[in-house]
Each structure stands twice: as structure tokens, then as C-alpha cells.
Image (tube, helix red, strand yellow):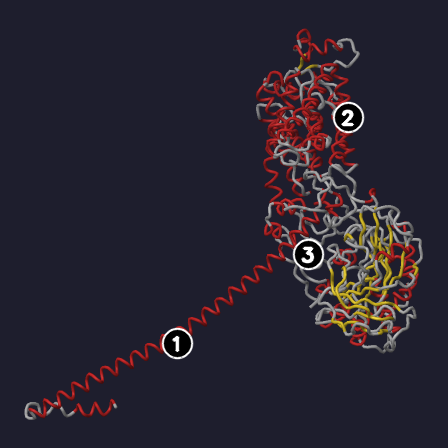
Amino acid sequence: MSIQAVISGPHAHSMSSVTRVMLLVMVALFPATAFGLYRFGWPAINLFVITIVAAVLFEIACLSTAKRPIAKHVLDGSAVLTGWLVAMTLPPWAPWWIGVLGSGIAIVIGKHVYGGLGQNLFNPAMVARVMLLISFPLHMTTWVLPAPLGSAGAPSFLEGLEITFLGTGKFDAVSSASVLGHVSTELGRGLALDTILPKTFSYSQLALGQVSGSLGETSAVLILAGGLLLLATRTITWAIPVSILAMTALLATIFNFIDPARYPDAVFHLTSGALMLCAFFIATDYVTSPSTTAGQLIYGASTALLIFIIRTWASFPEGVGFAVLLMNACTPLIDHFVRPRVFGRNRSGKPLAVAAGDGK
Amino acid sequence: MTLSFSNLLGSGKLFSIRGGIHPDDQKHLSSETAIETMPMPTLLRIPLQQHIGAPAEPVVAKDDIVKKGQLLAIGRGAVSAAIHAPTSGRVIAIGRFIAPHPSGLPVATITIRPDGKDEWCDLPAPLDLEEASPEEIADRVASSGIVGMGGATFPSSVKLNLRKRFSLQSLVINAAECEPYLTCDDRLLRERSDDVADGIAFMARALGVEDVIIAIESNKPAAIAAMKASAAKIPAKAQVVAVPTRYPMGSEKHLVQTLTGKETPSRGLTADIGIVVHNAATAYAIHRAVRFGEPLISRILTVSGRGITRPANIEVLVGTPIADIISHCGGLVDEPRRLLLGGPMMGQPIANVRAPVVKGTNGILALSESETRRDEVMPCIRCGSCVNVCPCGLTPLDLHSRIRNEELQGAVDIGLLDCVACGSCSYVCPSNIPLIQSFNYAKGKLTVQQRTKHRQEETKRLAQQREERMEKIAAAKREAMAKRKAEKEAKKKRDAEKKKLAAEAAEAADAPAKDEATPKPKPQTEAAEQ
């Protein structure tokens, strides 16, 4: 089909645009990101910048290979956002090439192999995270305790460059397990939760992000604030975040009730790992999630179920990446079968019957 | 984004509809300017098709002198509408002229040069509300050439006659005017609410309904107040209801659902659920027709947009060239980005400003750069905004992708034909995809395909019939031939037998004693055969 000149209405437009949507998401991500960069210092800043620059360069390379308009698509902001999200999920002191490789996987394999913007089946950032996690488990699970910019133990700018480009070297001492990883390991050793949890951190630390973890995932509160901004600006709808958070809370509460020594409670699940980021920023990715409200509820609840299963019973401490990818694969199916009821028709698509006493 | 409301507004409980949008309505540009009339244009071009259905048939000839209100063309067939002279003057041409349609193609048009006297012809006697029968009212509406003036231009008399086929309970007057910019119905209700109420009373009588709901969007408080005061004069039980300001509230089936909670079956009419919907401007036209005998020769329209020097609401004669109306409003500020007939959501581009306005024209808009959509289209990012705003429960993004792949049947399967082309999806699309254009393309292509299919089937049927006929003829021929052949053979046989008999007879004459008994039956057979 070719559209010669636009002659059909509407001639007015809401003036929303892809760029505007991407910018809004970035604004919403900013508080959590800024906090993460502050907490983890110069190495994190280096990694963040490198990852985004690499994403944009990969985008340009792909667009020029495909002979598509470069300025139009680079300026839409989707590559910057993808790079940003990849960086959010990386260990903050990861070496530079992890960031570059992550962006390469996300942009080239995750996005352009499928045909570019809007065509990808899987969330590019999650493709990158999962591929990196499987390929480089050591680098991807080397966490550091936060050392805020300007604090005593924090690396200086030059030391930061050293960490990012030459390896962590003398800063080995501060490495630490992520909360989910720690709990998983300790549970594996047969310890009960009530002995594991108080030793390591408090809930307020977990919620505020004063723990080790990925660059942008640690502060559940700030991510929640960003998510609420997305909801307020109607950039995303309520269905996916609510279904993910509610389902996670429900499952955690049920199992915690069954055996509190073995299964952490809802607050732990909601505030740890990538769950908040997933609920508001990852699973809500337009391209890879269902487009109807009912479909989104199914998708969100199923994602939460998979996250809970992986976190609780699988060998990986965190399940967001795998859960999201698995549900991405189900999205076309959900969209095919779950549609709104058409006006004037019943659920099975037949025109409504004329009620007795009406009309004829 | 699916807002739901079941707020109590006006006097009755309202029901929620799915989706919808809140476009910037820009009604303030023209809402405070009173309805004005235009000076007589130098030429009037009156197209013979200003309505849905068959074009009207001219009953005047070139050079005829006509009076104002005189019949120019009569409706042909069940769904058609009569056309009358908007003023007195001379018919200077009956030919083809640019249509007020995006194609700008010529259509059959009568051109009148006004004589400036504006003299009425003899008009039919006024009808009385208490005495007029439903048939009389419907006939008057038909002979006055009144069509739905909200833009659909369906002949109103056909809708007034629905009482014969359906059992009707309510008449809904659609004064929602949900299209941005348009204020002509708003002004009409504010300035002539008594006349509109009178028209409504006649409509209710013609339809035989006792219940009337006048629906006005809540952003027109002055019109609501004026109409509330006038509605008391309608003998039937009439209520004015303020409906939420949300596009496309004026979509007939959605308006009915908002007011009554009843959903019209797909592919059906609102009459199926006992409700008939008429536009407020139609009610006014009916008032003029029944009370004064005046046919529909003028209408009120809004001229607006940032590209118009002096936005206004004007009562114009049908057939007035668009260019004359624009220059009456001070002309264009600048080269407009879009020049439209109708509103910015469902209006159509004007191909040529020499084209006339017709009975269904409710607005002329000149939109500037900042008021129109940009040209750049991005790929669909599946954000689902279109699904959330679709008032018909469709999935526009899926429809579009199927149409792009030329899967027209696939698009029909997921509801293409249930689309009312309101444009909400395209309005909110961040990728600026011309979704309605895509749907219109598919609907048009389906119509062509259906026509082609129908023609092919017809051809096939005729060919089959011909084949059968030919087969019959051939069979008859074969039969005749076989008969002749059989006759020939029989004759041959007879001849041979005759010869044989003759030979035998000769033989027998030679030796009569030889077989006395046998020759006896033979002459008998011979006789029978002859």
C-alpha cells in the first residue's frame, strides 16, 4: 500500500511523538539513575556514559547499513533509552567492554535484526542483560558496596577510569553480594531467613537503595517515583505495573505465610532486585508488551509469577530478565486472542441481538 | 487512558462509553460571534447530489427564470432529496461543476445567476402541530428537501418514516457538536432555541414518540440553558441533557449509549433499539418547512481556524462558493496548511475554493501549521494508545498492520467495518500514522473487490446459463438428427424389404406350391407399414 498524500482526517493531532515519549521515560528514570551514579561513584558514571554512547553508535551503524534515515531515528531517542536501560541493569563497576557489548547486543541483535524500531519481539535491554549474564557470569555478578561520590572510600575520577578501563584491581575489598544473591546463597546453606536478613540490611536500606546491586535498580522508592510520573503523564497505563506488583505481593505473602523461615515476605520481594524497574520501565516497554488492558493484566501477572518462581526455586537469584523475555515471546499470542469487545458485538464477534420489546 | 464516568449531569443518569479523546476544541474562536447573513453571491452553484442516495433529477431548463424556493430537481427513488432554488434568478447552466469533495471532480450542477430581488415562489400552507398527521409532516419534510445536517446528509423524511418499520420510544436530538472549532449548532441553540424546539415537537409527532432527549456537550452552558427554557414548549416529555465533553460524543450510536445505556447492534440502526437520532440543525430546518413552507435552501456554518481573518458563524445559501464565504470573513491570514470542509477530525480537504457549500457543510476551516498534524510518520511502537481511545473497541494498530500487508479479509475479521472513522486513534498516535487513511483505503478497496466479485459472479452465472441454453439447443439438434437418421434407416430397411418381398413374390409365382402358408402374413405387414 502506498500513501500518496494525506487526505483523510483527522487533520488535528495530539502533538505527542515518539521522541516525547522517550524523553518522558528518561525524565522518569533520572532520579533513580542520578542516585545510582552518586552512590557508586566515578566508575558507574563512566560505565553509564560509555554504554549510552555505544548504543547510539551501534544505532547509527545499523541505520546506515540498512540505508534508513539516520537523523530521524537517532533523534527519536529510542537508542539512548535502550542504552540507558542496559546501563541500569549492569553491576556499577563492570569494565567498559561489558557496557559496549551490552549495548551492541541490545541494539544490533535485540532491535535491528528484527527490523528496527517497533519491530523487535524481545525487550532489547533484557536480551543484553540475559546474554551478558550467561556469557560473563563473573563480571555480571561482581557487586560492590555503595561508596558515594566524595565519601572516604570512594574512588577518585582517575581511579574510576582505572576501574572501568583496567579492571577493579585494588578495590577488590569492597565487593559484596547483591541482596537477592546473598539471601539465595544463605538459604542454600540451610539458614533461616530470620537469621539471614537482619544481619545484612534493613528494609529501609533496601527501599532507599543503600545496598549493593545493579547501577539503577537499587532504589525502589526513586524508581517508584519515576513510575508514578509515567502514570501521571499517561506515558504508561496502570495495568502492567499493578498486575506485576500485586501478583508478586500476593505470591510472596502466601508463601511467607506458609513458611516464614524459607520465603521472604512481600516487602522484601517488592523492594529488592530489578522488580520495581521491571514493573514500571522494563515490562511496560510498548513494543514487547500486549496492547490491550486485559492482555496487559495477563502479561503482568504471568511475568510476576515467573519472576517469583525463578527467584524462589531456580538457580539464579534474580528472574526479571528471563521472565520478561519469556513473556515477550507470548505477547503476539496474547494480542491475537485478547481483544476488546467491539461496539455493537458480543464477545464472540456476533452482532448484538435486539432485545425483546425494543425496535421491530 | 480508558476514562470511565457515570457522573450525574443534567437530569438523568448517564452511561459510560469506551475510549474517546479530549482534543483542543478551539471553539472560543467563533463561539461568541452571532449568526450573520452574507450578501448575495454573484453566482450560485447547486449540485444535484447533496445527500446520501440517488442524485436528484432536474425539472428546470437552461434560461428558465426561477423564484426563491422553487423546485429545481426532484428526488429519485426511495432515498433521495429534492433541491430548491436558494434565491430568485435565471438558470444559466445545467452541467458539471467542481464538487465540494476532496477529489474536486465535476458533478451535475445547476448554476443560477441571482436577480437580486430574492422573490419567494408560492409556498405550501403552514402545518399545525395539533392537526398535522405524521404522514403530512414527513411528506412536507421530504418535499422540502431536508437532509441530516450534521454532515451525514441522510434524507430526513426517510428517518421520520421509521415508525412504520420499528416500534420507537425516543427521539434523540444530537446537539453534541463534538468536533473542535465548530460552533454553528451552539449559536443556533443559543439564538433560536424556540424554533429548534418547535421543529423537535413536529419530529416527535411524526415519529409518534412521547420521549425526547436533547443532548448537548457540557462545554456549551449557554446553549444548554437556552434549550432548557425552550424545551418546556415541546408537548412530548422533553429533557435537555448535558453530556460529557468528549470526542466522538456526537457519534449517533455512542450518544445513544451515553444517554440510555443501550448499545446498537453492529451493522444495525439505532431504530433497532427504539431510538431515532436527528441533528439540531435539522430540527430548525423542519421548523422552517412546516411553519413557513420554506424548503431547505440555506444553512448555518462556522468559518474558523487561525488562518481565517475573522472567524464567524454565517447563515449561507446552499450553492454559495467557498471563496465568497472566505472573503466575506476577511480572507485568509496566510496560506493555510489545511483548508477543510467540516471539522478538523472528520472534515475533508477542499480541492478548489470555487466549489460551493452544500446542505451538509457545517464548517469551513483554514488551519495553520500549529493546528495541523506534522507530515513525518514514524514506525508503530505498539504503544496501544489507539486501542485505549477507540470508541468502537477495535485494535487500530493491528488493523493497520494487516492492511499494510494487504490482508483485507484479516482486517475485516477484526472489525474494520465496525470503524466509524472518528479519527481518535490517528489523533493520539505518537508515530503520527495516518490510520484513518489506511482504513479508508481498505474500505474502498473492499468495495471495489466486492463489486468486481459481484460482476464476476454475474458473468459466470450468465455464461453458465448460456452454456445450458446452448447445450439444450445442441441436444435438440442431436435428437432431431437421430430421428432423421432413424427414419432414413427405416426407409432403407423398408426399401430393402420391399425389394426382398418383390423378389420373393416373383419366386413364389415361379413355385407357388413350395410354401403355401408363409406368404400370407407378409402382405399384411406391408399394409401396416404403409
* Residue B57 screen position, x and y as percent: 74, 71
What subunit carries mark 3?
A
State the residue at coordinates (70%, 64%). B272
Q: Is residue A273 visible?
A: no
| Rendered view: B370 above or below A66 | below
Q: Position of residue B298 (x, y in %)?
A: 86, 65
Give the distance between the C-alpha atoms of the residues marked 3 and 1, in whole angstroms.
57 Å
Depth check, mark 3 against mark 1: the one in front is 1
Query: Which of these two is toward me, B87 or A122?
Result: B87
In the image, residue A256 sits, relative to residue A151, either above or below, namely below
> Of A150 and A76, which appears nearest the observer?
A76
Location of residue B137 in the rendering, given as x and y in whole percent from the top left corner:
81, 74
For badge 1, the amino acid type reads Ala
Q: Nearer the viewer, mark 1 or mark 2?
A: 1
Q: Which residue is mark 1?
A: B476
Asked where in the image residue B359 lies, by quadrant, the reply is: bottom right
Q: Which residue is mark 2?
A: A30
- The mark nearer the N terminus, 3 or 2, is 2
The three-letter code of the residue at mark 2 reads Phe
Q: What residue type is disc 3 on?
A: Gly
Residue corresponding to mark 3: A344
Callout 1 crowding tier (Cα within 10 Å): few <14, some 14–19, many ≥20: few
What is the secondary structure assignment of the residue under circle 3?
A: loop
Is any atom of residue B335 visible in this view? yes
